[in-house]
Image (spheres, rainbow, N blue to C red):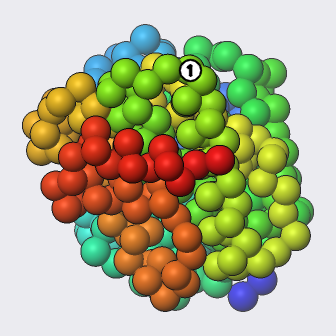
Amino acid sequence: MEYKIGKESRCAVIGYGSWATAIAGLVAANQPRVGWYVRNPEVLESLRSEGRNPRYLSDVEFDPARIAPSDDLDEVVRAADILILATPSAYLKKFLEPLTEPLTDKFVVSAIKGIVPGDYQTVVEYMHDRYDLSYKQIGLFTGPSHAEEVSRGKLSYLTVVCTDPDNAHAIGAKFASESIHLSYSTDLYGIEYAAILKNIYALAVGMATGLGYGDNFLAVLIANCAGEMTRFLTESYPAARDTQVSAYLGDLLVTCYSSYSRNRRLGLLIGHGCTVRSALNEMTMVAEGYFAADCIRHINCRHRIDLPIADMVYDVLYNGASARKSMRELTTKLI
């Protein structure tokens, strides 16, 4: 079906983590009231009474009159025209489990950079298949964007992706602020898969850093990651796209280098000698690259694209391969 977003379209956020909180802050500044599905009782009560999320980005203060937090998913969905998904991909199905309200007349924006575990699908693919949504009803909000910086008004360059450019610009208006520089794209497939792959590559960079490799090597590793990402997108879904722009390359770079990067941190712990299980247990937030490595490996079985870096990460995470030995073998395949 055709779906045109109007200026008065109402937004709701699904999720209560750091990225969901940052997004709620952006949207609340641009519309009178934003719906917000919050499963956690402690967070829900605090948002209602104090206008703060006590678990994530607790320094961000909301005007209680501009947010409508609720633990009733159907209520939140019913009152919204645009649903913004901002949960870890591993928990998306659980968040949406209580939903009985139809989504046929909604527009769904994924702000999730991950694959739905077990289904081997991206969020866009999953929402299309599971909820019978047209790709014209689904968009992305993405780019190099750590929630901590977005919430504090640090200049960030983000991209809105829709098959219809008019809808992309209408959604962009919901996120607009002085510190958000927006660009627009129609490449749903390429940008979503780029956002998934970069988490795997940040794991590789974290491992290399933990193992003691220096900046010279990291530059080579990341350059090869960028090439591998471009190769996957080109061979799996050819399209006119420039993978050097921020939605592709920029997101890769910030995830590989930033101290905020969960995936880099998981790789760093493994590089320092932690087992994969103990490293995961030490993480306080979800590292999407862990699930992405398995899913990309599965998806690539039908494409058979040469992905030595992603394959190395998979072998360490799932086959018990030595990070040190695997990285040493990888160095012979880089250019």
Q: Does residue 3 show up? A: no
Q: Nearer the viewer, residue 76 or 206?
A: 206
Residue appearing at x 69%, y 77% in the figure: 235
Residue appearing at x 76%, y 41% in the figure: 246
Quarter of the image for the N terminus: give it: bottom right
Q: Is residue 284 left or right of residue 2?
A: left
Q: Does residue 179 show up? A: yes
Q: Is residue 47 left or right of residue 279?
A: right
Badge 1 crowding class, 10 Å Cα cut-off, few under 14, some 14 to 19, many 20 or more, is few
Q: Nearer the viewer, residue 320 or 252?
A: 320
Number of marks present in the image shown: 1
Q: Position of residue 282 (x, y in %)?
A: 16, 30
Q: Quadrant of residue 215?
A: top right
Is residue 224 shown above or below 106?
above
Residue appearing at x 13%, y 39% in the figure: 275
Q: Position of residue 168 (x, y in %)?
A: 80, 58
Q: Name the element at disc 1.
A: helix
Q: Position of residue 103 (x, y in %)?
A: 51, 76
Residue appearing at x 15%, y 32% in the figure: 274
Q: Nearer the viewer, residue 193 or 335?
A: 335
Q: Position of residue 186 (x, y in %)?
A: 81, 66
Is residue 22 shown above or below 133?
above
Residue at the spot of label 1: 215
Q: What residue occupies the far front of the structure in this picture?
A: 332
Q: Quadrant of residue 208?
A: top left
Q: Amino acid at mark 1?
A: Asp
